[in-house]
Image (spheres, helix red, strand yellow):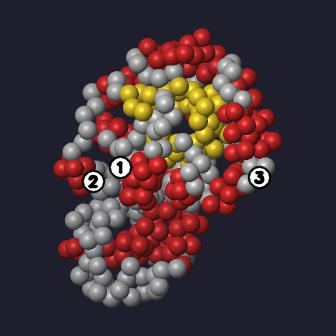
Amino acid sequence: MEHRPLGKTGLNVSILGFGGFHLLEIPVTEAEKLLNAYLDAGGNYVETAAGYGNGESERKIGRSIMHRRGDFVLVSKTDKRDAAGAAAQIDRTLRHLRTDHLDGILMHGIASIDELNQILAPGGAYEAADSARQAGKVGFIGISMHGWPGALIEALRRDRFAAVMSTINYYDRCNYPEIENILLPLAQEKGAGVILMKPVADGYLYRSAAQAFRYAFSRPVSVVVAGINNEKILKDDLAYAESYTKMTEEEEDELLRDAPELGSYVCRQCGKCACPQGVHIREVFACEGYFDRQMARGVVEDTAQYALMERLRFWFGQKELGQARYAKISGGITACNDCGKCLPQCPYHIDIPAKLRIADYKLAERGIY
């Protein structure tokens, strides 16, 4: 399995990482089998969080593989925003994991610039993490966020973090284009490690897992962290990592064109459409991506798939962000007169006027559409 540098941390990590959240779903005996099988196969990045089951995931990892502590890079997360809370949580994490040090600690789920300012202020969580680093309890300090990457971008600009963890997959590329257009190039410029999470979009891409992992491994990232809770998933994920070859630009274009999860509804943010009436088509659809990941589409073709989409559409809790940005777009969609001149411009055959009405229904909270 390929290994890559984790930014400037001095650590080299396998391209497939083992995420600890889904260990909550299985007994410790099964977790032990999976974790050891992953290490035996050459994986060396294990990540969890204090908040996963109030420490349950950490305790399962501690019991299962800490006798092999030298074989892997161990990372956890703190969701506290103040120094005292973070310090206590880091110490609890070390007890749960049965170790005296973490290779890295991430500030967990920093959703806004206000939260970033909070953890970086005197008495904030970063202060505790830095003290723990000086005491040898943790190695690098990183930061994570789901969906909108604004706080991660600002964090990198302030040069305080050695790594960022972000949602990256070929579906959410269309909902949060700033991740690949701004965050990844900035991380490369700063020499920060990039930890990719959600390669199959919280399970939404499960029918296309092979191409989803290949897309993820092809990003300029250090490690792709996957949730693993049974032997088949572990076997499949290892196979994807071991057989990986980088996607060409032509293959990526083909994936974005033909992926069934994108279909003829999801805007790829290619910018090729234009409205003679002045409707900001691309910006409206970007707001819809923030709002619900473009998952409510006004049609139900498969009940199970619809139920999954309903579960995931507000997973990142950024509904209000989409609505606030839409409110700033001059005129919204009011200028659209269904002339249809935008339709032949879309390479993905999206019914743009119909999608604009659905987006407006969501973002402006219309009573009906």
Q: Is residue 351 above or below residue 158?
A: below
Q: Nearer the viewer, residue 82 or 130?
A: 130
Question: Which amino acid lies under the numbered mark 3 shown in the image of this protein?
Answer: Pro
| Residue drawn at the location 45% of the way across and 44% of the way down | 191
Packing grade of label 1 (10 A; few <14, some 14-19, many >=20) is many
The reply to whether the C-beta atoms of the residues labelled 1 and 2 are less than 8 Å apart is: yes
Percent x, y for residue 90?
72, 33
Q: In the figure, is residue 235 to the left or right of 85?
A: left
Q: In the figure, is residue 130 to the left or right of 67?
A: right
Question: Which amino acid lies under the numbered mark 2 shown in the image of this protein?
Answer: Leu
Q: Is residue 305 visible?
A: no
| Residue drawn at the location 37% of the way across and 72% of the way down | 282
Q: Nearer the viewer, residue 168 or 182?
A: 182
Q: Nearer the viewer, residue 214 or 125?
A: 125
The image quadrant that residue 317 belongs to is bottom right
- The numbered dot on residue 209 is none
Distance, label 3 to label 1, CA atoms, is 38 Å
**Element under label 1?**
loop
- The numbered dot on residue 170 is 1
Question: Which amino acid lies under the numbered mark 1 shown in the image of this protein?
Answer: Tyr
Percent x, y for residue 38?
45, 19
The image quadrant that residue 345 belongs to is bottom left
Q: Quadrant of the N terminus?
A: top left
Q: In the figure, is residue 283 to the left or right of 313?
A: left
- For marks 3 and 1 on the same chain, the one whose residue lies earlier in the sequence: 3
Distance, label 1 to label 2, CA atoms, is 7 Å
The reply to whether the C-beta atoms of the residues labelled 3 and 2 are less than 8 Å apart is: no
Report which residue position mark 2 lands on.
256
Q: Which of pointers 3 and 2 indicates the residue nearer the eye?
A: 3
Report which residue position mark 3 lands on.
122
